[in-house]
Amino acid sequence: MNNQSIARRGLMFVLSSPSGAGKTTISRRLLSRDANLTMSVSVTTRPPRPSEVDGRDYIFLTEEAFARLVREGALLEHARVFDHHYGTPRAPIEEALAAGRDILFDIDWQGTQQLKQNARSDLVATFILPPSTAELERRLLARAQDSPLVVQRRMARAADEMSHWPEYDYIIINDEVERAVAGVGAILQAERLRRERQTGLSEFVRSLRGTD
Ligand code: 5GP
């Protein structure tokens, strides 16, 4: 018997950062090495970028379809970022948590605040900072998926987003991606071992004590 065999509730693992801080790379590495972690696929009204696939990166919706989901209460949180709406579909998350699967969220500080209000005990929130402003700009330009105007706006917004770091449980400075991935992996591992998440412990300890 090890901790993996004990029934537990999944957790909501939020990674936030200004765009370009390396969050997407860190998320991909984590997902590829951790079979119990799945990505929450958000809905958005933003048009897809060339490399993005509908249903994998986002579920791309019209303004009307998004507004309907909000009205129906089908989103766990939602926010306006830049000129577009983003939100997290509720049903797949609730199902995964109950089944003991962990969900990775790439959402902004506004969404994180809403999850804090609605689901604090399931939430582990980590903020990723870039090592410097120059490096942040270099990464945004290197990505070249957005127009120069969009890059400029993202830089301006980055300063604003970074001011929200005190609202997070953990802070990682992404100076070297492998080190950042190891740090995030350690947070995940420790949070999985929290007593209150290991819902099968009472039963296990009863069996250890021979009182069943
Ligand atoms: P992008 O357009 O670059 O994919 O994402 C822009 C911002 O929206 C990022 O900061 C990302 O974390 C945030 N975002 C993506 N999906 C969601 C969501 O479902 N909810 C919230 N609140 N923010 C999101």
Image (tube, rainbow, N blue to C red):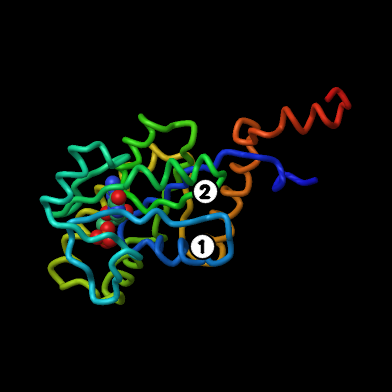
Is residue 93 or residue 29 the one in the foreground? 93
Q: In the image, what residue occupies the spot 48% across and 52% down? A: 172
Q: Going from the N terminus, do you reach mark 1 or mark 2 first? A: 1
Q: In the image, what residue occupies the spot 87% across and 26% down? A: 209
Circle 2 packing at 10 Å, graded few (<14), some (14-19), many (20+), is many
> Which part of the image, by quadrant, shows the N terminus?
top right
Q: In the image, what residue occupies the spot 23% across and 71% down? A: 49
For ligand 1, which image quadrant applies? bottom left
Tell me if 166 is positioned left or right of 184 in this view: left
Does dot 2 land on a helix, a strand or a loop? strand
**Badge number at residue 102:** 2
- The percent position of residue 67, horizontal first and vertical second, equals 14, 45
Is residue 51 or residue 186 the one in the foreground? 51
Can residue 62 be seen here? The reply is yes
Report the amino acid beneath label 1.
Leu
> Which part of the image, by quadrant, shows the C terminus?
top right
Residue lying furthest right: 210
Tell me if 84 is positioned left or right of 207 in this view: left
- Image quadrant of residue 22? bottom left
Q: In the image, what residue occupies the spot 72% across and 46% down? A: 5
Residue to which mark 1 is pinned: 31
Does dot 1 land on a helix, a strand or a loop? helix
Is residue 183 or residue 41 the one in the foreground? 41
- The percent position of residue 81, horizontal first and vertical second, equals 20, 51
